[in-house]
Image (cartoon, helix red, strand yellow):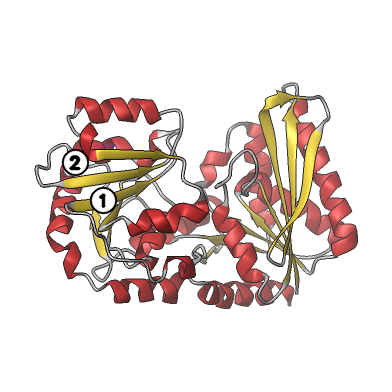
Amino acid sequence: MKILMVTPWYPDKLSFNSGAFIRSQAAALSGEHEVVVISAKVNYSKFGLCSFDSEKSFYGKVEEHRIIINRSLPVYNQLNYWFIMFWYSREVIRNFKPDIIHASIGYPGAFWGLLLKRLTGRPYILQEHTRVKNNFRSLFHKTLTKTGLRKADALVAVGRRLASELEALLNRNVAVIPNVVEVEKFQGLAPVKESGIQIGFLGGMNTPVKGFDILLKALAGIREDFVLHIGGAGTLENEYKKLAEDLGIATRCKFYGFIPYENIPAFMERLHFYVCSSRYETFCVSLVEAMAAGRPVISTRCGGPEDFVNELNGLLVANENTDALREGIQQMMRTCHDYNAEAIAKYAVDNFSKRSFLQKINSLYKSVMK
């Protein structure tokens, strides 16, 4: 089968880790299918009325096309974005001739998929990775998003809570297919050598959604010996560093800044356990990566993690509750060595590997190809 994936989230020179999980999906699909990916985004740091950069590359067997469109005038900017995106997609389709279109992210993915269906006559599915209302930045964005979602041949969410939100909004069924995680990259990591409990956190720091402030406040009340390893960068990074100082735990926090995707296994190898303190998650890839490394996890009840964090691999605690998170961390500090690392890693492989993803997505493809 020939699959065309279209997405605004994909690793590129503007954001090296953006949509890395979508790239992992493409790589998984390329084991059984021909896969071409087109990603498109606006570069808001560079102005140009009708200018863009494009790049073609390969990731294993996946053919990748990246379009980075330069910012232009208000209103015209969006029209220009859609014109360039559609024109470029048409040029790719002339040579590739896909059997199915796999679009990601409600805006622009849903309407982009609809346009390409009308161009090719082929079905399209939309896989949502983010809270759909995040796409409703204006009436224009909301209209295109909802139109594309309603007309998709199938809708997929990466978690059950997100699926429920989509079903309530659109009054139609939504399949649940989790993200694929490259679990093999996390196999066979060495045991932790450092003394004291080593705790991990990964997340962007441009918004407070990852709840890193909650985690710091929870840790401030813990007297036991620990080190918090922190991966991530963004506009709030200096604010978080100051908060750690104000709370008196700066010496126990190691800020690594941005961590490239290929270096995440080495980051996980340092840890006794991993913490997700998010206010909201549709999935949380980093939790599964920690599990693939055989590390137990703690997560807030923030959406996606409730689907897969359980007694075998970790703890769930109340969302946006500093005291509950602190109690969970203290419990994990006492019990992290009691978890079965092999069983945790096996759970990740059984549920989030390429094989697991392919079984589910192939079934969906067949259902819309009839």
Q: Do the residues labelled 2 and 1 touch (CB within 8 Å)?
A: yes
Foreground residue, 3 or 194?
194
Tell me the residue at 66%/40% (across/down): 143
**Which picture quadrant has residue 84?**
top right
Is residue 238 placed above or below 149 in the rendered structure?
above
Residue 238 percent across, percent down from the top left: 37, 26
Is residue 210 placed above or below 23 in the rendered structure?
above
Residue 161 visible in rendering: no
Residue 269 visible in rendering: yes
Is residue 190 placed above or below 103 in the rendered structure?
below
Residue 219 percent across, percent down from the top left: 19, 41
Q: Hey, which residue is sitting farthest front in the picture? A: 193
* Mark found first going from the N terminus, 2 or 1: 1
SS state under label 2: helix
SS state under label 1: strand
Residue 19 percent across, percent down from the top left: 57, 50
Labelled disc at residue 219: 2
Foreground residue, 350 or 188?
188
Quarter of the rendering occupied by the N terminus = bottom right
Number of numbered discs overlaid on the protein picture: 2
Tell me the residue at 22%/39% (across/down): 252
Amino acid type at mark 2: Leu
The residue labelled by disc 1 is 199
Q: Gap in Å between the C-alphas at discs 2 and 1?
A: 10 Å
Q: Hey, which residue is sitting farthest left in the picture? A: 223
Quarter of the rendering occupied by the C terminus = bottom right
